Amino acid sequence: MPEREITFAQAVREALAEEMRRDSHVCIFGEDVAEAGTPFKVLSGLVEEFGAKRVVDTPISEAGFTGVAVGAAMTGMRPVVDIMFGDFITLTMDQMVNQAAKVHYMSGGHWRVPMVMRTTLGATRRSAAQHSQSLHAWFSHVPGLKVVLPSTPYDAKGLLKTAIRDENPVIFFEDKMMYKLKGPVPEEDYTIPLGVADVKRAGDDITLVATSSMVQVALGAAILLEKEGISAEVVDPRTTWPLDEKTLIDSAKKTSRVIVLDEGYGRYGVTAELAAVIAEGAFYDLDAPVKRMGAMHVPIPFSPPLEDVTVPTEQTVFDAARQLCGKA
Amino acid sequence: MPEREITFAQAVREALAEEMRRDSHVCIFGEDVAEAGTPFKVLSGLVEEFGAKRVVDTPISEAGFTGVAVGAAMTGMRPVVDIMFGDFITLTMDQMVNQAAKVHYMSGGHWRVPMVMRTTLGATRRSAAQHSQSLHAWFSHVPGLKVVLPSTPYDAKGLLKTAIRDENPVIFFEDKMMYKLKGPVPEEDYTIPLGVADVKRAGDDITLVATSSMVQVALGAAILLEKEGISAEVVDPRTTWPLDEKTLIDSAKKTSRVIVLDEGYGRYGVTAELAAVIAEGAFYDLDAPVKRMGAMHVPIPFSPPLEDVTVPTEQTVFDAARQLCGKA
Amino acid sequence: MTTATSNPETSSAAATEKEKWLRAYRQMVSIRLFEEQVNEVYTRALMPGLAHLYSGEEAVAVGICEALRIDDYITSTHRGHGHCLAKGASPDRMFAELLGKEAGYCRGKGGSMHIADPATGNLGANAIVGGSVGIATGAAFSARALGTDRVAVCFFGEGALGQGSLYEAMNLAQLWKLPVIYVCENNLYNEYTHYTETTAGSILGRATAFGLEAASVDGQDVRAVNEVATRLVKRARSGAGPAFLQCDTYRYSGHHVGDINREYYRSKQEEQHWRTDRDPIKVLSKWLLEQGYADAAALDGITSEVRALMEAAVKFAIAAPYPGVDEVEKHVYA
Amino acid sequence: MTTATSNPETSSAAATEKEKWLRAYRQMVSIRLFEEQVNEVYTRALMPGLAHLYSGEEAVAVGICEALRIDDYITSTHRGHGHCLAKGASPDRMFAELLGKEAGYCRGKGGSMHIADPATGNLGANAIVGGSVGIATGAAFSARALGTDRVAVCFFGEGALGQGSLYEAMNLAQLWKLPVIYVCENNLYNEYTHYTETTAGSILGRATAFGLEAASVDGQDVRAVNEVATRLVKRARSGAGPAFLQCDTYRYSGHHVGDINREYYRSKQEEQHWRTDRDPIKVLSKWLLEQGYADAAALDGITSEVRALMEAAVKFAIAAPYPGVDEVEKHVYA
Ligand SMILES: Cc1ncc(C[n+]2csc(CCOP(=O)(O)OP(=O)(O)O)c2C)c(N)n1
Ligand SMILES: Cc1ncc(C[n+]2csc(CCOP(=O)(O)OP(=O)(O)O)c2C)c(N)n1
Ligand SMILES: [Mg+2]
Ligand SMILES: [Mg+2]
């Protein structure tokens, strides 16, 4: 029997539905999450199955309902909060960072905050500067939080289920351009542990460490590179925290050349940490400096020809990799 | 005549007073900034000189008055916003990142947002997890913002004056443990450009790149190292954005060994960017991996013996440097 | 009333009145036809991304902006084309912006949700719900601090009542007696959710609680909107402080141009009712005809003129060039 | 009233009444003397950092918490010792927390501004002004979702009225009819600024605007506080929804223990007036004496007992060990 293929959005929905069936404490808060199933239609059908007490439409109060989720998580529920665009996490930083991330520690281990925040990242949707950011570096910076960046339907489902079962606040970033991406997802229940990188493609000459949206870009670039006789390994950390440093470093040691790809802004972002970790861990094995590729350092412009150059593409990654391998 | 010495707090106050005298558009918004002169007394005397229309006490509404400052800056004022503890920037992220940072770009260069946000960083004040963070990495990540981290009274005054005259939103982080630190500050008007690192101490064997509170720690460690015959160069970038990459890389090339020090959380923080920049720029000159030292990866604990181990100290920097130089 | 009309003062007042409302009529028609073209451009797949149409709500933007001076400030929303036009922007540069062209108000960098026009005091549309309440309040702060008598108007949908920043800003505005007017466009829906599901208590009460002068008005009647706006603007200009105005209105189209199947959140009858019985352009045209300020042909003439203008504007925008790729790194810093 | 007292039901009611208010008295004295010790420990330079004393406000915490069950929730503030004690925490572990000792409620990791006590439903003090409104509202959500009849009380100072999150939470609570009570402790000052300089309009209006049941009460009269709290708690428990209670009160000491010179923001006369004429412990003791529920000696006895307890608690805390340094990396993740 051929493996079942579903979209990224379906994978997210299945994970939620299965966990909600499994555990009556799981509930969802967010804007237009019920009948509308979110503007991206990711949650369609959930309110019909679980009712409006568990799939709860909120006012446009990101700080407010995130705070409510923190309190609900402390007292027995397992809320999943939906923040429509990742740009709106700006409104939730106090609740996530000063409350959710610290409650367990500050209470000496008494209270727990088992909640998930689902939100989006990614540009090239012509949504302009306030609807296109990939701000996951901020949460990755904060002790007490875990950050998940799925890059395939399979990973999305398995990681989201784990995130919901986790006893800590977990932020789950979905690339909004990937919702329609199809991929194999088994029917059976499975989970994927947080903190385990996945080698999405094995290779020998260069390592492309890529997160979220950039994994598909890296895989595309790897095919182009193959035609040039360059064998690229694509490593997806899958979670920026916990971070599977070993898999990253091992791959770097093997290939001795590394490009790190992430759709967040380059400076002081995820690529900096990954590059620093690899540069330190594979110091004696690298043949060239780790190259970082992230979003260009500008607010995302609306105009299509401008927006298109702000993020790494298969072509730019291909070019950079060739150059790094001394073939350009 | 011996050089005049004033405290860090006085230097900040002088910068504000001089700029307010120079330009009637400069005004201050914040909680308890007027008669109280802030809980840290940094602004004492300003309301007496400039009046309550220019030194404006606000309600406890960090998001609200930051937003008002953005609008005021767009329309002719040059507001300086006071956020008492750096931990409270969590409440201002939307206004700073989605508005202030982007207005100029999104309007195609029409509107400008010449505002300064002054806030604090730094632990070891026994203020616990919600009053001890150093979150400057977040703003450093965002295009459109500039981030200043003064480490001496001299730098504080010169950089703050420049920040106030800048046409962009600038965030100015003051180490609250440093307010009483004294240092030479000339009577005459001077400014320091943003984006120019300062070599706080020259040396040959190892580079200590340090920001804000960590500069004094690095200088202390350098003295300890000197006794061991290790000559340490201390480089202070002074601004995380714009970043003077060249000075950092040149020093690294010269000494071939680098420790990067910053009081923010280590992971996905300022040390990651600085380490990545140096590892790339001085790749062929480094004798050892760049070592990163930041706040321990935990919410800052209240208990003094626990809090004390969360931040790098002269001793831990000394130990790390000796080891890096192969002398441990 | 022969005596009255023979009085030169009254008759010139009537002439002004006539001019005023014909101008308002033209403005409302401009918005309506602008949005028709937007939808058309979207349907022809010429528009990057989405847009949120203002059709149905024209009397709000026009009624308010006609009470403002050109140097007064406004802040706008994701549903901002109406505010922008009503404040005086020209459709060609707006369309250019919507298509991401260099001739656009923001050189194509902002797009539909960020159009700003300094020449007419438009501080910008905003894609963060509630994101501009601080900006408008700050503009009012400047107006006063700089010794001008400018006023700032903050437009927002009733969905922004969910955002705490609104309450923070109203508190500040009232404490400091700032010349700002918060205009709540209650079109009944936050995206796909009826506002009663998201809004407890009373809308006006949320403003009066902070001491603001507050009023509500039929947002389909441009004259009513303008009357109360004129009063509140005058009040603010004179230093008496901020105000809040709730305008009850309706958006005819989907939340955005792609929101086609709407029955799961609102009925076709409801939509039809507003279009047929409450249309702001119909309401005004009926009155204009009654007053004898225009006949049907004159009104049709306005519509034709405006339509031609809008078509030309779209053509201009389609033909206009994109910004050069080197533009991408410009304007990050001033 | 001889007949009345001879009625066994009434006399047992009176006995209960007597017990109840003697207990409240003891609780208030506990808070007062706890804070005396805190100040003492600070003055002796034994306390790391600062602390915000609750003295003067005792009737609020006690009046409210005496209306709650032990399994009801509270959230507290930077000025949280009173709430914590009133809900039932023991002073020895509290002092241990204040000194950063392992025996503290949070193993020394939280300190004064973060004490939490799961056994008594105290979700924690909070050092972010307004930071716990969401948490309390979420606890109320759980209470209902889990089918219990628990209630959550959110304590906050009037300074938190400046934070938008309060309005977001009240809106949610009212929409969802959650059993949460927002208790505003109006002690007149946000740090060093009088609340009238930061609070436009009406405090109660800010709650009624969102549809909440709202009341205000003399926060120096524990019986009055308890009476209205009892009503609001019952109402919330029965599913009738959230409420807001403004308690007018005063802090005797500085904003924190180090705030010694206060004349620039408030007068000594004002302080003296509250201490002399409005002291909550005096108010209750006067009533207890009038009712014949206690004589002066009995009340003094309570004070002596409590003082001994507090002194012992401080001793315990001083002698207790700090957590081991390896604790620093524990409890980051559950
Ligand atoms: C902070 C924030 N949250 C959510 C959104 C997504 N969003 C865009 S428009 C909208 C509904 C706005 O409703 P309303 O304010 O009533 O304006 P209307 O669209 O009805 O004009 C939402 C939720 C957003 N843009 N910003
Ligand atoms: C978000 C935030 N802003 C500012 C502060 C600093 N701060 C601590 S207490 C306080 C005043 C609080 O006043 P109020 O809420 O009335 O409580 P009170 O101290 O009077 O009990 C302020 C401004 C803070 N802790 N959190
Ligand atoms: Mg609406
Ligand atoms: Mg107070």
Image (cartoon, coloured by chain):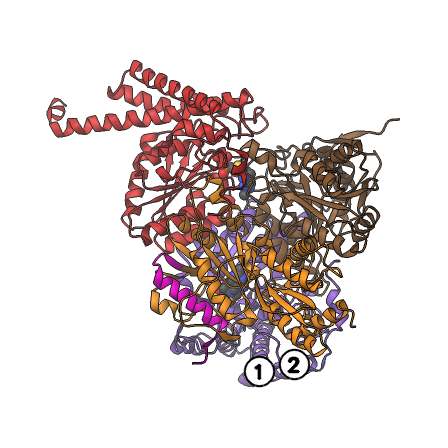
Chain colours: A brown, B orange, C red, D purple
The question of residue B7 being in magenta is answered with: yes
Secondary structure beneath dot 1 equals helix
Which residue has dot 2 on it? D314
User: Which of the two residues, C274 or A64, is positioned nearer the viewer here?
Assistant: A64
The circle drawn on residue D40 is: 1
Tell me if residue B51 comes above or below residue B139 in the rendering.
below
- Do discs 1 and 2 share a chain? yes
Q: Which residues are magenta?
A: B1-27
Tell me if residue B287 comes above or below residue A7 in the rendering.
below
Q: Amino acid at mark 2?
A: Val
Chain of the residue under label 1: D
Who comes first in sequence, dot 1 or dot 2? 1
Image-based side of A51 in relation to A4, left or right: left
Image-based side of D237 in relation to D57, left or right: right
> Residue D2 in the image: x percent, y percent?
53, 74
Instruction: Name the residue at 73% across, 40% down.
Output: A321
Q: How far is mark 1 from mark 2, CA to CA?
A: 10 Å
Instruction: Name the residue at 71% across, 63% down.
Output: B257
Image-based side of A152 in relation to D214, left or right: right
The answer to whether residue C261 is seen in the rendering is yes
Which residue, as the protein is rendered here, is positioned at the far top? C297
User: Which of the two residues, B270 or A221, is positioned nearer the viewer here?
Assistant: A221
> Residue A249 in the image: x percent, y percent?
80, 51
> Residue D256 in the image: x percent, y percent?
52, 73
User: Which of the two residues, B290 or C285, is positioned nearer the viewer here?
Assistant: B290
CB contact under 8 Å: marks 1 and 2: yes
